[in-house]
Image (cartoon, rainbow, N blue to C red):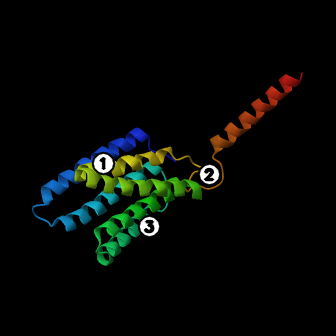
Amino acid sequence: MNRPALLEGCGVALAASLTGSLLFALFSPMIGSDTLLRLLIAGLGFGYILYLMRRSGQKTGRLLTLAAWSVSTLLIGLLVSSLPLYLLLHIGLVWLIRSFYFHSSLFPAIADLGLSGLGAAAIVWALLQSGSLLLAIWCYFLLQAFFSTIPTLGRPATGKSDQPERGDRFRRAEQAAEAALRKLSSTH
């Protein structure tokens, strides 16, 4: 697994917030703000999951993930009229995909869900305090950058088989031999 660093996540937050606010400023005179916000939410979410899939190193399931994202986004767009619910469902999709690609057990995934909830709260806080879309997007993605600090438990979620690679077996054998030598040298 190739988890992104916190600083890299801050860069993603900056890029997403600048892109989202610039697109909103450019297209808001032409498109209604509700429709444009929906397009931005879906677009930024899609860009973020592409980034996550690229950084995860996992090769399996990418096509299925993109298909599931597309169908879910289409269904959410057709069935959900409330913008806050639309946003929360997209945040949930991002969480599910990030959990699939980066977490191998329940506890890190639950911690990540908490982080997603904090991100949603940060959006509301930023909009209420400043009314700035740039700040709202920045706060959300900045908090999401902290998912890389969630400790992994169990085996990494890389989709690889349980068979260790040849180098890993050699490294374990070498470590076992060194431990045996240390044990022998300390007793004699």
How many numbered badges does the structure rendering display?
Answer: 3
Location of residue 81 in the rendering, given as x and y in whole percent from the top left corner:
28, 75
Location of residue 128 in the rendering, given as x and y in whole percent from the top left corner:
27, 55
Estimate the spatial distance between the alpha carbons at disc 1 and disc 2, rounded to whole Å: 32 Å
Give the label, 3 or 1, closer to the camera: 1
Estimate the spatial distance between the alpha carbons at disc 2 and disc 3, rounded to whole Å: 22 Å
Instruction: Give the amino acid type for the residue marked by disc 1 in the picture.
Output: Trp
Give the label, 1 or 2, closer to the camera: 1
Q: Element type at marker 1?
A: helix
Q: Is residue 105 visible?
A: no
Instruction: Give the amino acid type for the residue marked by disc 2 in the picture.
Output: Arg
- Left or right, 5 with reference to 86: right
Q: Is residue 186 visible?
A: yes
Residue at 41% x, 64% y: name it: 93
**Depicted 70 relative to depicted 143: above or below:** below
Residue at 47% x, 51% y: name it: 56
Give neighbour class at mark 1: few <14, some 14-19, many 20+ (Cα, 10 Å).
many
The image quarter in which residue 116 lies: bottom left
Location of residue 1 in the rendering, given as x and y in whole percent from the top left corner:
52, 48
Give neighbour class at mark 3: few <14, some 14-19, many 20+ (Cα, 10 Å).
few
Residue annotated with mark 2: 155
Residue annotated with mark 3: 64
Instruction: Give the amino acid type for the residue marked by disc 3 in the picture.
Output: Leu
Residue at 73% x, 38% y: name it: 173
Estimate the spatial distance between the alpha carbons at disc 3 and disc 1, rounded to whole Å: 29 Å
